[in-house]
């Protein structure tokens, strides 16, 4: 989940109730290749440096464990337990009532 895609797909930032990730997930502002090419553009001529920086970026910023530490996801789960965890989360939310604030203006097409 990168950038805007992460934000709009039921993330904690927009009110998602439960967020899980597998250990192989990648969550960051942008993909490692694009980020490294922007941040370290002075090293673009050296493929070895770029590869090392890309690996460092992936480890440091894209790990779901980092996202879990920061509270962006609730838990890193194993793929084989996904069905059980989602069923539990849905059961927990079965009686949830959500109040939508009153809107003074609607989003009408102009």
Image (cartoon, rainbow, N blue to C red):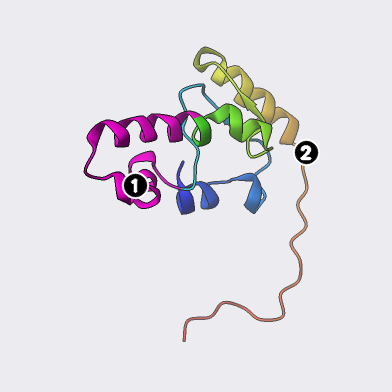
Q: Quadrant of residue 100?
A: bottom right
- Give residue 33's position: percent from left, percent from top: 33, 41
Task: Report if residue 42 lies within the magenta region.
Answer: yes
Q: In the displayed image of the protein, which residue is found farthest to the bottom?
A: 110
Q: Secondary structure at mark 2?
A: loop
Instruction: Determine crowd level at label 1: few under 14, some 14-19, many 20+ residues with C-alpha closer than 10 A.
Output: few
Q: Whole-Å distance between the Cαs marked 2 and 1?
A: 43 Å
Residue drawn at point x = 68 percent, y = 23 percent:
88
- Left or right, 5 with reference to 14: left
Residue drawn at point x = 66 percent, y = 36 percent:
18
Q: Secondary structure at mark 1?
A: helix
**Residue at the disc numbered 1:** 34
If you read the primary sequence from the N terminus, does the residue marked by circle 2 or circle 1 appear first? 1
Toward the viewer: 74 or 57? 57
Q: Are marks 2 and 1 in contact (CB under 8 Å)?
A: no
- Left or right, 74 with reference to 49: right
**Residue at the disc numbered 2:** 95
Residue drawn at point x = 67 percent, y = 31 percent:
69
Magenta stretch, residue numbers: 30-59
Q: Main secondary structure of the magenta part?
A: helix
């Amino acid at each position: 989940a990168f950038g805007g895609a992460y934000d709009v797909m039921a993330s904690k930032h927009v009110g998602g109730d439960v967020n899980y990730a597998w250990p192989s997930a990648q969550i960051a502002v942008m993909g490692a290749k694009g980020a490294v090419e922007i941040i370290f553009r002075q090293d673009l001529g050296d493929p070895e440096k770029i590869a090392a920086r890309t690996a460092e970026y992936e480890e440091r910023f894209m790990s779901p464990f980092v996202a879990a530490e920061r509270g962006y996801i609730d838990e890193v789960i194993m793929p084989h337990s996904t069905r059980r965890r989602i069923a539990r989360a849905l059961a927990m939310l079965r009686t949830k009532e959500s109040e939508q604030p009153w809107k003074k203006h609607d989003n009408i097409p102009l």
